[in-house]
Amino acid sequence: MTNSQEVVSPEHVKDEWFQPLAKKHGGAEAVVRPSLSYWKDAWRRLRKNKLAMGGLIFLILLMLFAIFGPIFSPYSVTATDYPNQNQPPSAAHWFGTDEAGRDVFTRTWYGARISIFVGVMAALIDFFIGIIYGGISGYKGGRTDSIMMRIVEVLYGLPHLLVVILLMVIMGASLTTIIVALTVTGWVGMARIVRGQVLQIKNYEFVTASKSFGAKSSRIIRKNLLPNTMGPIIVQMTLTVPSAIFAEAFLSFLGLGIAAPFASWGVMANDALPVILSGHWWRLFFPALFISLTMFAFNVLGDGLQDALDPKLRR
């Protein structure tokens, strides 16, 4: 019986027989997705949400008009022109004029400055107080957490609007008073969210490793815990801003807003209420329109960020 396979001696073994095959780079690139960081992936998913991106674009344009609109407008925010009072929208006055002949278009954008400033400042103050208070409460736990949360529950049970109105009456109507009044109990929601996130994360392995290396509590909270809770915190901030804007508009509507002749959207709506039945619809329409659109834009942006920053939805 003959062997059909030819036996090759070691001297005849060629080196090129053992060379690795050439890699097909094109095929590998076709099936392997590039690695994305958490924030890049969140931005990619946010861009796919058309409604949230529409809200973001509207807010950017609103801020640009609020900054530059009164600057480039030929009309003053405070100067009166009684012969042209209560003029309807026209080529000269796009949004019409008010009872003192002031241009409603210019005052609308100036009012946007006040309303957005109040909303953003209230959200930032809530952010700083909430993350410090909630972070300490959640990380310390035990008796410290119990005492701090009882204080939060007492503040949470107070009627927020009643406290705000009471402070406004005591301290007097001003922009600073509005911001202080909105943040007295406004940080409570942020603190509870941060505490819940910290309680969930503080037992993870990377936090335990930091403890084993002797890191201080302040460093662990700042470097390990808070960066991993920024998703829900950012979402809460985007939802706090429209709430503060609406609260400021409501207080201004009650006569507790900034003093004349300057205006916010709430002050303009309050001034327009007595003449709305006279047919001067534009005086209430434009402030109310921008209050509604701004709140809607912040809410849809917050919903989009909530979906984009949710790690459970990453693919």
Image: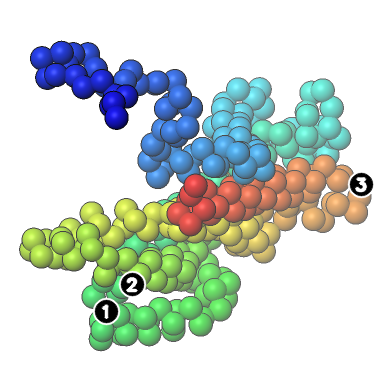
**Residue at 37%, 58% in the rendered image:** 229
Picture quadrant where residue 207 is located: bottom left
Disc 3 marks which amino acid?
Answer: Gly
Q: Residue placed at 64% from the left, 25% from the top?
A: 73
Q: Are marks 1 and 3 in contact (CB under 8 Å)?
A: no
Quarter of the picture holding the N terminus: top left
The nearer-to-camera label among 1 and 3 is 1
Q: Is residue 114 depicted above or below 311 in this figure?
A: above
State which tag comes first along the sequence, 1 or 3. Answer: 1
Residue carrying label 3:
279
Which residue is depicted at the point 17% across and 58% down? 219
- Alpha-carbon span between mark 1 and mark 2: 8 Å
Q: Label 1, on which residue?
A: 141
Q: Nearer the viewer, mark 3 or mark 2?
A: 2
Quarter occupied by residue 53? top right
- Mark 1 or mark 2, which has the lower sequence index? 1
Q: Nearer the viewer, residue 21 or 156?
A: 21
Instruction: Specify the amino acid type for callout 2.
Output: Leu
Q: Residue at x 31, y 20 (%)?
A: 21
Mark 1: few/some/many CA within 10 Å (<14, 14-19, 20+)? some
Residue 265 vs residue 25, the one in the foreground: 25
Q: Earlier in the sequence, mark 3 or mark 2?
A: 2
